[in-house]
Amino acid sequence: MGLEPTGHYWFALAQFLEENNIGISMVNPYHVKQTKELDDNNQTKNDRKDPKVIAKLVTEGRYSYPYVPMGIYADLRMTRKLSLCMPKA
């Protein structure tokens, strides 16, 4: 599955896919933007074009694999995030 990670929205989908043994590949949002502009010489954002560009980048091998922590490692990451948000005494 090819994803364009934007914000935090992709985390839940990535976790679901990993739990169901579906591989994830991520393309850089900047590369999607640049490739889209090269293809049609147009800077407009269009959600109809994005899936095509993402699929093209994945088939060309221009992607990376995300690290999605599972189990205790996910718990440790969440604990760390929460500890950073806690007010200092």
Image (cartoon, helix red, strand yellow):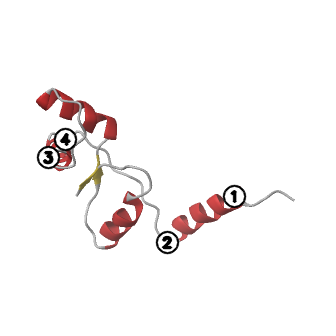
Q: Are marks 1 and 4 in contact (CB under 8 Å)?
A: no
Q: Position of residue 8 (x, y in %)?
A: 44, 56
Q: Tell which tag, 1 or 2, sits nearer the viewer.
A: 1
In space, the residues marked 3 and 2 are separated at their CA atoms by: 34 Å
Q: Position of residue 14 (x, y in %)?
A: 35, 62
Image position of 70 with respect to 24: above or below: below
Secondary structure state at the residue bearing disc 4? helix
In space, the residues marked 3 and 4 are separated at their CA atoms by: 9 Å
Question: The N terminus appears in which quarter of the rendering?
Answer: bottom left
In which image quadrant can residue 21 be found?
bottom left
* Badge 4 density bin: few <14, some 14–19, many ≥20, Cα 10 Å: some
Q: Earlier in the sequence, mark 2 or mark 4?
A: 4
Q: Are marks 3 and 2 in contact (CB under 8 Å)?
A: no
- Which residue shows up at 27% across the image and 35% down it? 33
Q: Position of residue 76 (x, y in %)?
A: 60, 64
Q: Amino acid at mark 3?
A: Lys
- Which residue shows up at 78% across the image and 59% down it? 87
Q: Earlier in the sequence, mark 1 or mark 3?
A: 3
Kindly identify which residue carries mark 1: 85
In space, the residues marked 1 and 3 are separated at their CA atoms by: 39 Å
In which image quadrant can residue 23 be found?
bottom left
Judging depth in this view, the residue of 23 and 41 nearest the camera is 41
Q: Tell which tag, 2 or 4, sits nearer the viewer.
A: 4
Kindly identify which residue carries mark 3: 52
Mark number displayed over residue 71: 2
Q: Earlier in the sequence, mark 1 or mark 4?
A: 4
Residue farthest right in this picture: 89
* Badge 1 density bin: few <14, some 14–19, many ≥20, Cα 10 Å: few
Kindly identify which residue carries mark 4: 57
